[in-house]
Image (cartoon, helix red, strand yellow):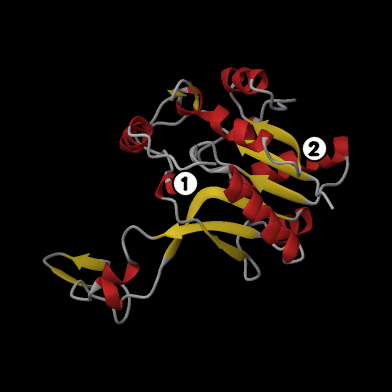
Amino acid sequence: MRLRILALITARGGSKRVPGKNIRPLGGKPLIVWSIDVAKEIPDVCDILVSTDVPEIAEVARRAGALVPWLRPAELSTDTASSVDACLHALDWYETTYGAIDGLMLLQPTSPFRRRDTMLRGIELFRSTERRSVLGLSPAHSHPMWCVRVDGLSMRPFLDGGGVSLRSQDLPEAYVPTGAFYLISPAELRRERSFCNSSTVPMIIDAPSESIDIDTEWDWEVAEAVMSKGSLPAK
């Protein structure tokens, strides 16, 4: 049976490291449109809602086919505002206006290369685990057991049992959130006020391009290089 999943794209303005990044062209289309376009391909997505405080972002999102019924309130758009509060604001408005949904899928616009089949896999995992929250994870680029604490001219392992002398083949697998996929039931988000809790189900995403999270100019250059080399995997 088809679920009712709301795809929510949060796109606050005011980025200091990459000004205007949400509507900056990447591969010929604004960054935010990458997330809108892939969400359109998911049968279980009942709507694509964009929460933004910037009229220019709102207009670009509307032209791409997203629902942008309001600008995000100022108190939810500051540097210190909680992203969960912004998500709950959007969720409450949508369910009041259009009725209950089965899941809220958060798509960060800074992760443009998520694939359709990855999203379908995450939704199926959500469905098969009684609609618990699902979080996308990718292999850690730098293993936490290699990390150190620095104190003046001395250093020590950040984790007990760690150290720079450990061989990579002796390290356990470690993963980090990708930012590309979050899916949670409305009840669980309201109860936990977090997309990650003790019952969250991990979904491993191996494709390196899907783990790209554009937060700096360097990240942007990496994304452009991936595209120019034709390194994006098939959907």
From where the camera sits, is residue 157 visible?
no
In percent of width and height, residue 203 lies at 56, 61
Tag count: 2
Circle 2 residues within 10 Å: few <14, some 14–19, many ≥20: few
Residue at far front of view: 234
Q: Out of 190 and 220, give the one closest to the viewer.
A: 220
Q: Say which residue appears at 80% left-offset and 37% top-offset.
A: 93
Asked whether disc 1 touches disc 2, contact meaning CB atoms under 8 Å apart, the reply is no
- Residue farthest to the left, as pictured: 153
Q: Nearer the viewer, mark 1 or mark 2?
A: 1
> In the rendering, which numbered label is found on residue 210?
1
Q: Amino acid at mark 2?
A: Trp
- Amino acid type of the residue tagged 1 in the rendering: Glu
Horizontal side of residue 126 vs 175, given as left or right: right
Is 57 or 203 nearer to us in this picture?
A: 203
- Per the rendering, the mark at residue 93 is 2
